[in-house]
Image (cartoon, rainbow, N blue to C red):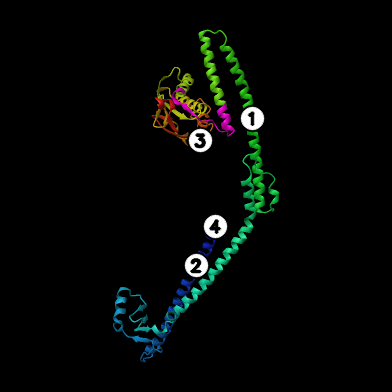
Amino acid sequence: MKARQLRTRIIAYFVGVSLFISTLFGFVCFLFAYTIEDHLFNFLLKDEASYISQQIESGRQPVPRLEFIKYLETDTQLPEFIQHVLKEEPRAKEFAGTDDKHYHLVKMEQGLLLAEVSEHLVVRKIKVGMLNFLLVVLAVVLVVAVILAYLSLAMAKKLLKPLDRLVEIVAQAPVEKLPQNFSSQFVNDEIGGFASTLEQALDRIRQFIDREQAFTRDASHELRTPIAITQGALTLLKQSELSEKQQQLVDRAAAAQAQMAQSVETLLALAREETITQKEVKLLPIVENCVLQQAEKIAGKDISVDIQVPSEVTFAIGESALNLILCNLIGNAFSHVSSGHVCVKYDDGVLSVEDTGPGIPFDIKSELFMSGVKGKYSQGLGMGLSIVQRLCQRLNISLDYESSEAGTRFMIHCPVRKSSLDNKK
C-alpha cells in the first residue's frame, strides 16, 4: 500500500511539474506574441512619424503612407474615449475601443498619428489555433512525463533493491541476535559502504550487549550469594538469646536485608528487561515502611511528616518495585528539606510525595531524570530519580512533578481499586 502511494506521488510530481512548466511556457508564448505585435506597430508608427515630419518640414500636406494610420493636428481630433483616457493617463499609447477596435497613438512635435489596427492584429486572429496547438503539446508532454515517471520508478526500484534487501536483513533478525557478516553480499558502492558501516556498528552493539549481559549475570550471582548468606546468618541470630536492644538491631538489619534483596531483584529484572511482577498490594503499609526506612535522613531536623493514604487503597504494582520507587522519592524529600513539612498523599488515583524544600534548581530541570544529575548541594549520587523513571516507564506508570521555590511535588498515576476484603465489608 505504501509502495503504491509512493508511486502515485512520484507520478503526480512528474505530471504536476510538467503541467506547470507547460502552462508557464504557453503563457510566455502568448506574452511574447503580443509583445512582438505591439513592437511592430510601434515601429511602423515611428517610421511613419519620421516620414510625416519630413513632409511638414518641406511644406507639403502630411499624408500617411499606410491606410490604417491617420494624421491629427490636435488632441481635440481624437475620439472622445481616447481623450478621456489621456486625461487620466497622459503617457498611454494603446487604447481599446468599442466593437473590438484597437488603437495605437504616437505624439509628434507637430500633431499626432493614430492607427486603428484591429484588422492587423494577427495574434487575435490566430490565438484559438495557438491555444489548440499548445493544448496538444501539453497532452504530449504529460504523456511523456508519465512515461518518464514509470521509467524513473523502475530505475529507482532497481537501484534501491539492495537497500530493500538490507532493510529485510535487519528487520528479520531476532531481537536477541543481531545480524552478522551480511555486508559481503552487497556491491562495493554507496549502499555497500552503508551496509559495511552498519555491520560494524551492529558488531559494536552486540559486543556491548554481551558485556552488559555478562555483567548482569555476574552481578546477579555475586550479589545474591552474600544476600543469601546474610539472610541465613540473621535467621540463626534470631534463634539465639538476645537482649531487647540486640533484638531491635537484628530486626532492623533483617528489614534492611529484605529491602536490599527486593531492590536487587527489581534492578536486575530492569537491567535484563525481564517482566517485573505486578500485583495488587496495600499501599499504606508500604508507604509507612518507606518512611521508617528513610527516617534516619530527618534525624535532628525540624520536619513534620504527614501520611494521607486510606488503609483500603491498593496499587497494581509489585511490592518490591513500589517500595523502591517510594523509598527514592521519600528519601529525596527528606534529604532536601532542612525544616518544614513532607506529605505523602493519595487522592483520586494519584499518589504524591510533597515537600516544602527549596525546589529543584532550574539548571537541572531539563535533565532531572538523567543518571548522575543532581543539585549543587545534593549528597546523593544522582541515580535515584533515573531509576524511578525507568521503573515507571517499564510498569506503564505516569510520573510527573511540579517544583517551585515553595517546594516540590512528585506524582504517580497508577490504576487502583478497592481491595476485595474491603468490598466484602
Label 4 neighbour load within 10 Å: few <14, some 14-19, many 20+: few
Dot label at residue 217:
1
Residue type of the residue flagged with mark 4: Leu
Find residue 323 and report its horizontal and vertical position in percent: 50, 26
Segment tinted magenta in the rendering: 265-285
Residue type of the residue flagged with mark 2: Leu
Q: Nearer the viewer, residue 150 or 82?
A: 150
Determine the secondary structure under disc 2: helix
The CA distance from mark 1 to mark 2 is 65 Å
Classify residue 364 as left or right of residue 82. right
The CA distance from mark 2 to mark 3 is 52 Å
The CA distance from mark 1 to mark 3 is 23 Å
Which residue lies most toward the bottom here?
60
Which mark is in front, 2 or 4?
A: 4
Determine the secondary structure under disc 3: helix
Classify residue 384 as left or right of residue 71. right
Q: Are marks 2 and 3 in contact (CB under 8 Å)?
A: no
Tell which circle, 2 or 4, labels the residue nearer the N-terminal end.
4
Name the residue: 58% across, 12% down: 237
Tell which circle, 2 or 3, labels the residue nearer the N-terminal end.
2
Q: Which residue matches tag 4?
A: 6
Residue type of the residue flagged with mark 3: Gln
Q: Nearer the viewer, residue 211 or 35?
A: 211
